Image (cartoon, helix red, strand yellow):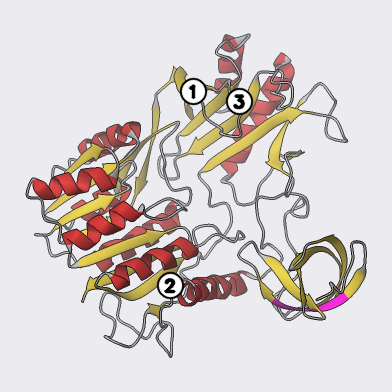
């Protein structure tokens, strides 16, 4: 088949869908074009940028017929910044699309039947045998802005219209590149984070601090990270540096403390590797505490510079409450929490379970989990560092029999050996917390083939205005 378009062609196309990256899907004589910023139901004029054998990419020039879901993006740098993908789409439409995105993956990858009728026709934790998996309406936010409690900002030197060539800039990478867009305000960040990043950049400029240059490997400051406790109000500033020595470090500390009265922790992380990974191995406290504290649903957490802690506290509570509900606990059950991190889900579960065992491959996270259990006086949870697929079979040999297994894996999904372990342990219920619908669907297929039935899924919008969706799924033993 000959390709009907060439690079630099200007075409008119109807937009028929949205990819998992939030790009509009257009067709020209059967040939697929992905168009950033276009919405389903629209007719657009677009310029072809790149052509491959099966598909191409095009730039949106004009919207000839707009979708009723189109809105004006309130962010001044939305067009350039790669942080959000859906600010041009109404929030209600995003919630609908995210639910459909979960359904599409369950059907296409998981080969799962979806229950007909109203999205919320099922009773949570019950479901109907043989009726297909119930996918509930996405739980959204009443106020879907300023929700992030953590900012990670790459730092560079000015130039190309951004500040002077010898001054620090910091913001987000331009879409699809490593060019930093300097910014002082991000509408999905908590105001305290914006304020802290802005002031740290100002202090850096004043002190003549250099930014790390990816190509030469020279320069000092690579990233600034800020964490804010939504309940506690405490702030941690982390300076990620290319080298352990910070010139005028006392002036840095003094400037930050003076500019940010809420700061309780100033930390340095050293990363001298030529890598895109943000953190290096060495972390040291420059001033104040090693951790800040925050609360989720009345449970206190100590959060260190490198702790994994969900970035949207309000929606985390919604997600974890659903996970606990799906676990169906009466107070006597033994629960295993695989991929337990710093113990967030474990401690939610421990309030209603007989005993909780958490396992996580990162030793520092396990230390945090133990500290967080002690902080809350929770004595029926214990934690062990190691791969879940190694630790859990050993627990089984030691006589630990799980009534419920909860998994909250990274984007790549569960390790196949862990899924095999779950099938051998045969818990009554499996609760799967997912940040990636495609790997959720793949893993549900394995569990269904192994004797479980996926009953229902609750999508939760953890990251409004982006394409990401979290969900929690209940499986019961057939």
Residue position for label 1? 267
Observer-nearest of 39 and 445? 445
**Do tag 3 and tag 1 residues touch (Cβ < 8 Å)?**
no
Asked where in the image residue 191 lies, by quadrant, the reply is top right
- Residue 149 is left or right of residue 356, and the answer is right
Q: Residue at x 18, y 55 (%)?
A: 335
Regarding residue 430, the answer to whether it shows in the image is yes
Q: Residue at x 84, y 72 (%)?
A: 3
Pick the quarter of the image with the N terminus: bottom right
Q: Position of residue 354 (x, y in %)?
A: 11, 55
Q: Position of residue 403 (x, y in %)?
A: 15, 61
In the image, which disc is placed on residue 298?
Answer: none
Q: Position of residue 350 (x, y in %)?
A: 19, 52
For the image, the number of numbered tags is 3
Between the C-alphas of marks 2 and 3, the distance is 52 Å
Answer above or below: position of 434 versus 122.
Answer: above
Regarding residue 64, the answer to whether it shows in the image is no
Asked where in the image residue 271 lies, by quadrant, the reply is top right
Between the C-alphas of marks 3 and 1, the distance is 16 Å
Lower position in the chain sequence, tag 2 or tag 3: 2
Answer above or below: position of 322 versus 307.
Answer: below
Q: Position of residue 228 (x, y in %)?
A: 49, 39
Q: Residue at x 65, y 55 (%)?
A: 84
In the image, which disc is placed on residue 259?
Answer: 3
- Residue 206 is left or right of residue 137, and the answer is right
Between the C-alphas of marks 1 and 2, the distance is 44 Å
- For the residue carrying disc 3, how many other residues have a C-alpha within 10 Å: few (<14), some (14-19), or many (20+)? some
Observer-nearest of 230 and 18? 18
In the image, which disc is placed on residue 110?
Answer: 2
């Amino acid at each position: 088949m000959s390709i009907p378009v060439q690079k630099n062609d200007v075409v008119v196309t109807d937009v028929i869908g949205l990819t998992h990256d939030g790009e509009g899907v257009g067709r020209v004589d059967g040939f697929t074009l992905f168009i950033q910023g276009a919405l389903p139901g629209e007719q657009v004029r677009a310029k072809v940028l790149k052509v491959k054998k099966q598909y191409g990419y095009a730039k949106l020039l004009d919207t000839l017929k707009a979708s009723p879901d189109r809105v004006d993006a309130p962010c001044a740098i939305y067009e350039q910044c790669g942080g959000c993908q859906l600010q041009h789409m109404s929030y209600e439409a995003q919630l609908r699309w995210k639910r459909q995105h979960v359904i599409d993956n369950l059907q296409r990858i998981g080969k799962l039947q979806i229950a007909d009728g109203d999205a919320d026709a099922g009773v949570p934790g019950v479901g109907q045998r043989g009726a297909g998996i119930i996918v509930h309406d996405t739980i959204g936010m009443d106020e879907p802005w300023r929700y992030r409690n953590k900012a990670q900002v790459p730092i560079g030197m000015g130039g190309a219209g951004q500040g002077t060539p010898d001054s620090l800039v910091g913001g987000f990478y331009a879409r699809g590149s490593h060019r930093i867009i300097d910014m002082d305000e991000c509408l999905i960040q908590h105001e305290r984070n914006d304020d802290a990043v802005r002031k740290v950049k100002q202090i850096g400029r004043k002190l003549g601090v250099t930014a790390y240059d990816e190509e030469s490997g020279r320069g000092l400051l690579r990233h600034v990270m800020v964490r804010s406790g939504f309940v506690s109000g405490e702030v941690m500033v982390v300076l990620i540096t290319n080298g352990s020595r910070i010139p005028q470090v006392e002036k840095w500390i003094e400037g930050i403390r003076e500019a940010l009265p809420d700061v309780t922790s100033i930390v340095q992380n050293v990363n001298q590797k030529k890598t895109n990974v943000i953190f290096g191995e060495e972390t040291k406290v420059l001033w104040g505490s090693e951790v800040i504290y925050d609360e989720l649903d009345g449970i206190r957490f100590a959060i260190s510079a490198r702790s994994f802690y969900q970035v949207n506290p309000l929606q985390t509570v919604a997600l974890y409450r659903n996970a606990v509900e799906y676990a169906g606990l009466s107070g006597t059950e033994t629960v295993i929490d695989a991929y337990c991190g710093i113990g967030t889900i474990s401690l939610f579960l421990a309030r209603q379970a007989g005993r909780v065992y958490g396992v996580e491959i990162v030793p520092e996270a396990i230390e945090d989990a133990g500290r967080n259990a002690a902080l809350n006086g929770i004595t029926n949870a214990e934690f062990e560092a190691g791969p879940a697929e190694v630790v859990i079979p050993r627990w089984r040999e030691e006589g630990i029999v799980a009534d419920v297994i909860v998994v909250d894996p990274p984007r790549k999904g569960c390790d196949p050996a862990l899924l095999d372990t779950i099938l051998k342990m045969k818990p009554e219920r499996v609760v799967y917390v997912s940040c990636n619908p495609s790997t959720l669907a793949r893993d549900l297929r394995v569990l269904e083939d192994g004797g479980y039935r996926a009953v229902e899924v609750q999508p939760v919008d953890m990251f409004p205005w982006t394409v990401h969706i979290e969900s929690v799924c209940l499986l019961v033993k057939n």
